[in-house]
Amino acid sequence: MNKVARLWRKHNDSIVCMVCERKCVIPPNRVGICGSYKNFNGVLIHIGYGRISAVESRPIEIKPLFHYWPNSTALTFSTWGCNFYCPWCQNHHLSFRLPKDDDEYIPPEKLLELAIRFGDEGFSASFNEPTVNFDYLIDLAELAKRNDLYFMVVTNGYQTLDAIEKLVGAGVDGWSIDIKGCPKMRKALPNIDHNVVYRNAKAVLDLGGHVEMVYLVVTNTNDFDECIDWIIDMHISKLGEKTPLHINRYYPAHKWGEPPTPKEKLLSVAEEARRSGIEFIYIGNVGDPELESTKCPRCGKTLIYRRWYRVWEWHLERDDRKYRCPRCGYEIPIKGLYIPWKKTLL
């Protein structure tokens, strides 16, 4: 099913797609860089609408989101294509492949039915960049909101502000945003304005959404001192010390053969972030529960113990819709409810 897109404007015989910050100028009968939007007779058509490439129930902690509906599961789905094409992409079989007319179409109502059947608390658009399926996200998020299900995205955060406002307004209030690098990075993604990612993360927070930033530390690429300092400074100045930061280990994938990030490097970045004032810092992709558990920034008590992307211990107290450390009373930011039981995942 093809659908007229929501965000575009005319530019002579071409169309400017206003979904992502690339703002592709698309000539007649051509597609933008993500392959999901086409100029058809002077109208922008979302040709990738609902062309679903994968669907499964997954823990929210694997996104990673640690402060959003803890221990819940989300019906996770993806489409085809991307607007970045990172050379180290682990899901390149989805992200580097454009949608086709014969790809399976799943209407939003069908995904809603699956989420309810599987007992999921919400939805997650993930695996490939959700932005390329923008109009579908809006339609599904509105259905989810009417059925009391949450909606989150795992994204590079490169939308236009108009797209951000429409997504949050539709109910997309959970955002796991990848940090690809910094302005001085030259080895990969040289045409990306990394400032936009923080602009958008702040916009989500200002609109009442929940944000957690994910810094994949890629060896010999975005791991130099100036880049690390810039990322930490932007986090503090734009998002504040209470916004969680995930510092994740990179592994070689697709076209990028640099060695895996040394654990010592991840610990060093985390320590610098902690000294700068960021309160909730996690180290991922190393399999160490201590580095993925939440500790009270004030007294140091372990409040949430995680293992294998699930909550194994929960020690927070809840009053007046706020979660607090039971020892010292410090408020811990949590969006949504803690789900105090485990599920059998698909």
Image: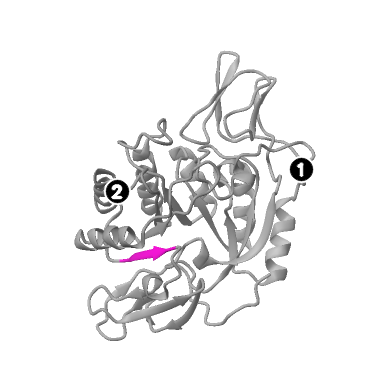
**Residue stretch rendered in magenta on the structure:** 280-284
Position of the C terminus, as image quadrant, is: bottom right
Q: Quadrant of residue 112?
A: bottom right
Which residue in the protein does label 1 denote?
Answer: 103
What amino acid does circle 1 point to?
A: Asp
Instruction: Write the residue at 22% across / 75% down.
Output: 298
Tell me the number on the disc at residue 231: 2
Element class at badge 2:
helix
What amino acid does circle 2 point to?
A: Ile
Residue 282 falls within the magenta-colored stretch: yes
Say whether residue 279 is left or right of residue 65: left
Q: Residue pushed farthest right?
A: 102
Tell me the number on the disc at residue 179: none
Q: Is residue 17 above or below residue 235?
A: above
Position in image of residue 56 (x %, y %) = 67, 62
N-term mark: 1 or 2:
1
